[in-house]
Amino acid sequence: MESKVNKYSKQLIIINSVFIIFWLTISVFPFLWTLWGSLKVKADFFSRADWYYAISGFNTLIETGGRFTLNGYIESWTEGEFGKAALNTIIVTISVVSISLFLGTLGAYALSRSTYKYTFWILIAALIFRAMPHITLVSGYLFPFFQFKVWGILPTTIIVLVAINQPFTLWLLYSFFKTVPKELDESALIDGCSYFQAFRFIIMPVMWPGVITAGLFSLMLAYNDFTVTALLLNQENYTMVPKINAYLGTVEHGGNYMWAVASVVSATAPLFMIVMFFQRQLISGLTAGAVKG
Amino acid sequence: MPHKTFFWFFFPSGLAMILFIGLPIFSSFFQSLHIEPEQILIEVETCDPFGCETEVQVDLEATAQSAAENPLGRFNGFGTYKDRNHLAFEEIQEAWQSTGDFSDFIKNVLNLPFYKSLLFTLTFCFTVTPCVIVLGFIVALSVNVLAKSIKGMVIFGTILPMIVTPLIGSLVLFWMIDSQGVLGATIQIIFDDPNLSLKSSKALTWITLIIYGIWHNTPFAFVVFYAGLQTVPQDPIEAALIDGATRTQRVRHIVLPHLYPVATFIALICLMDNFRVFEPIIGFSAEGVAQSLSWMIYKDLRNETLMLFGSAGATSMLTILGVGILLMPVLIRTWKEFKTER
C-alpha cells in the first residue's frame, strides 16, 4: 500500500541524495584509493611533491615503464612470504569457524531449552566475558603458554580465538534458537528421541540460517584478529594482519611500504567478497540482540 | 532439560570459556603480584701488583639460575599497582604537596603514564560513542527512504569501514591523511604550512583518532538503527500525519522514543569496544602522543629484552576494573529485572 507517509518533497530528496553520496564517498573512497595506490610505486602513492603524481603515475612510468605496476603484489607474495601468511589465515579461519560453531550450537541449544535459573547467570557471565578487552586476556596467556611450551604455534591461537569468540556465538545462537518453536523437539522427545537425537535430527536441519550468521561473525573475528595473533604467534606463523604490521615495522627497503599497501588490498578483497554474498545474514545477526531490546 | 543433559551439551563451550577467559584473568592477577627477578650482584675483588679493588658486578649465572627457578619473579604484593607506571600514589601525593595550584596538580597527574592513557581512553570512548549514535541515526533515516533497487548497494558501501579490522582501517586512512598522502598534502597546500601534519600536534592526532573511531563505528550503529526503523509501527505515524505533524515532529515524537532501547544497546556495545582501543594507535603510529590502556599492556608484552608480565598484569586488572565500572549500570538493570521477574 502506498501511503502518504512515504511521499517526500523534492527538496528533501535532493538533500538526502547529496548526503548519501557524501557518506558513501567517506566510507568507500579510502578503499578505492588504496586499491589504486597499490598499483603505483611508493614515490607516487606517498608523493610529497604533488599528489597529482598519484593519479598520473608519473614516477611509476619512470621506474617501471608503465602507468600501473604489480610489483608491490609480486614482491610481497614472493619475497615477503605473504602467501604463507595467507595460508595461515585460511587454516586459522576455517578451524575457528568450524570449532566455534560446533561448540556454540550445542551450548546455545542447551541454554535455549533449559528452564532453570542458572542459564540466566551463564548468559550474564558470557556478556561480561564479551566485554573483556582481548589484550588483558592475552597478558594472562603468555606466561603459562611459555611455561607449557605451546606459545607460537597455530593450534594454541585457534583454541584461544574459539574461546574468545564463544560468548558472542552463544548469545547469537541463543536468540536464534529461541525463535525455533519448542514444540518441534518436544514432540520428538515424546516419540522417544534422546535430547541429542532431537538436536541431531530435528534441530540441525532447521538451524542453518542462524549458523550461517554466527559463522560469518566467527569468520570476521578470526580473519581480522590482530591482538591475539600478533602476540601469540611467532614470526614464521604470522597470519595476514600481523604480517602487514611487520612490513611496516621494518624500514630497511623502501619497497616494504608498498608491500604493506599491496597486502592490505590482498587481505581485504576476499573479505569484501564474502560480505557481499552474505550481507543479509550479517545484518540480521547484528540486529538480533538489539531489536528485542 | 534435565541438569545432566544440560551439562553435557554445555560442557565443551563452558570449558573453553573457563579455561581461556576465566583462568587468564586469575593468571593476570597472579602475575601482577610478582615482579621480574632482580639482577643478583656480587662483589668481585680484583688484585694486581698495585693493590686490591672491589667492584660490583652482575652475577649472570646466579641471575639466570634464579630466573629459571622462579620464572615469575619474586613476590611483590600490590607493589606494582602503586608504582610510577600504574596508580602512582607516591607521585600523586608529592604533586599534591609541592604544587599549590589545582590545575598544575592535574597537569602533573596527567603526565603519569597510567593517567595519561586513562584520559585518552575515556576521551575516545565518550566522544566517539555519542557522535556514532547521532550519525548512525541520520544515515539510517536517509538510507531508509531510498528506492529499493539501490538500497542493497548503498548498505554494502556503508558497512565497509566496519568489516575491515581496525588496524587495516586505520592504515588505509593514515595513508591518505599522512603528510605525504593525498589529503595530508592537500591540507598542507591549502594552509600553506609545510610542517602541518597530524603528527605535529597532540590535539590533531587525537582528533584524527577520534574521527577514525567514528568512521569505524558508525556503520554498526547505522545497521542496528536501520533494522530498528523497520519495526516502527506505521499507524501512529499516519495518525500524526493526519493531525498535521511535520516530518521532524514525527521523527522526534514517534520514531525516536521507539528506538530508545536500540540506542542504549548501541551505546553499550560502542563503549565496550572503544574502551579497548589500541590498534588505531599502531595504525596511525600515534604512540608518541596518544596512549590507551590496552596499548600500555601491548607495550609491556612487546618489550624487546624482557616481557614485563607483572606490569602488564597490573594494567590488565585495572582495565578490567574499568570495564566493570562501565558495565555496572547494565548489570544493575538486568539484576533488577531478574528480581522482579521472580
Image: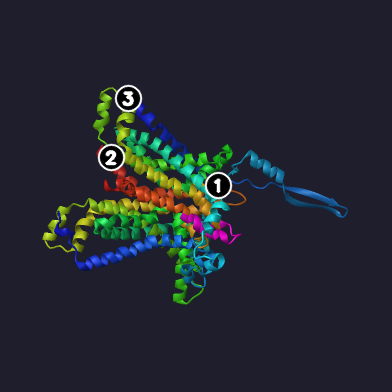
Q: Residue furthest right?
A: B49
Horizontal side of A46 relative to B132 (left or right) equals right
Horizontal side of A66 relative to A9 (left or right) equals right
Q: Is residue B167 visible?
A: no
* Residue bearing mark 3: A194
Q: Which quadrant would residue A216 be assigned to in this image? A: top left
User: Which of the image's four quarters has the C terminus of chain B?
Assistant: top left
* Residue bearing mark 1: B310
Q: Residue furthest front?
A: A65
Chain letter, disc 1 residue: B
The majority secondary structure of the magenta stretch comes to helix
What is the distance, in whole Å, between disc 1 and disc 2 at their CAs?
A: 40 Å
Residue for point 42% across, 33% down: B12
- Residue B19 x %, y %: 47, 37
Question: Magenta includes A260?
Answer: yes
Residue for point 47% across, 63% down: A37
In the rendered image, residues at marks 3 and 1 fall on the same chain = no
Residues in magenta, as a range? A249-265
* Residue bearing mark 2: B339
Residue for point 33% across, 38% down: A208
What is the distance, in whole Å, between disc 3 and disc 1 at their CAs?
A: 50 Å
